Image: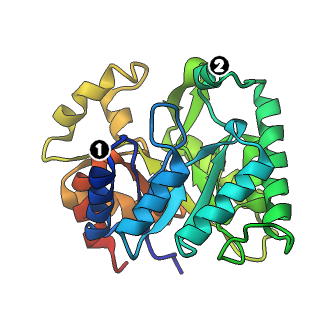
Amino acid sequence: MARPFRFGVNLMSPAPAGEWRAKCRRAEELGYDVILAPDHLGMPAPFPALVAAAEATERPRLGTFVLNAGFWNPALLAREVATTDALTDGRLELGLGTGYVQAEHETAGLPWGSPGERVDHLRRTVEELERLLGSEEQQPQPVQKRVPLLIGANGDRMLRLTAEHADIAAFTGARARDGGVLEPLAAEELDERVALYRKLAAGRAEPAELNLLIQIVIVTDDPGAAIQPWLSRIPHLTEQQVLELPIVLVGTLDDIVEQVRAQRDRFGFSYLTVLEPNMEVFAPVVARLRET
């Protein structure tokens, strides 16, 4: 049986307290299940942003999407996680990744390292967090017995780590290139990544929830015209290839609803995240799929 859908929105734009709380309330009104905060320089600091979101809302879960592990010391991160979980009444979901923007590390005066070193650091962070947050000696204590862990992954080693530790496996639908540029994966490539994850996760006692970050949402009767402004950003793909990307949802409302259902059937993605600029336009899709 397919998992019920969940929908999250990643709020990226800094805002004063009143405006921040208003858009969190709006996300709740629109039916989003999870309010998320990223971890990039120039965007809101994730943990205080989520505490403010909790004060403004009642129902949504609250998550980091995703923390850049290279910014964090595991012991200090455990304190942040436990405190935030307590202040949000146990609504926290912790998302972690390696980070993919070298310039942010350089600005912060933090080492960047090789891809392998970044995965090693993330593994140490995950394992140390599990040890600390699972210890009765840890102070402060989180409210939840286990704060759900989401890991954003694409490479082989990251998928193995995700299969071993994550409650939510988040597929980026893209690969990072030099300079922090993301190159989208075609559906066939994503098939292969999900198949590898499933193979690595075959021994799990409980299957993880599968997540996909959607980059483009446009409700339109003319998909070809609507996608034109994006083609220059992905010059190696044709118009039709862009429209067929799993991270792109362009078409009529009925078309997009069917695309989302088809992706759940094909890949297993039951938890979809959209970016803040797409919060309103994706809301009718959320409403249509709420009970399925």
Q: Residue at x 85, y 75 (%)?
A: 136
Of residues 183 and 103, the one drawn nearer to the viewer in this rendering: 103
Within 10 angstroms of label 2, few (less than 14), some, or many (20 or more) residues?
few
Q: Amino acid at mark 1?
A: Pro
Identified at 46% across, 31% down, the residue is 42
Question: Where, by quadrant of the figure, is residue 291 drawn?
Answer: bottom left
The residue at the point 43 percent across, 71 percent down is 5
The C terminus sits in image quarter: bottom left
Q: Amino acid at mark 2?
A: Glu
Residue occupied by mark 1: 277
Residue 188 seen in the figure:
yes
Whether residue 256 is visible, yes or no, is no
Please provide percent x and percent y for residue 180.
56, 24
As drawn, the label of residue 106 is: 2
Mark 1 Cα-neighbour bin, 10 Å: few <14, some 14–19, many ≥20: some
Q: Is residue 119 left or right of residue 152?
A: right
Q: Residue at x 77, y 61 (%)?
A: 165
Frontmost of labels 2 and 1 is 2
For numbered disc 2, what is the local secondary structure? helix
Is 126 rendered above or below residue 97? below
Of marks 2 and 1, which one's residue comes earlier in the chain?
2
Q: Is residue 113 above or below residue 97?
A: above
Query: Is residue 85 found left or right of 258 in the rendered image?
Result: right
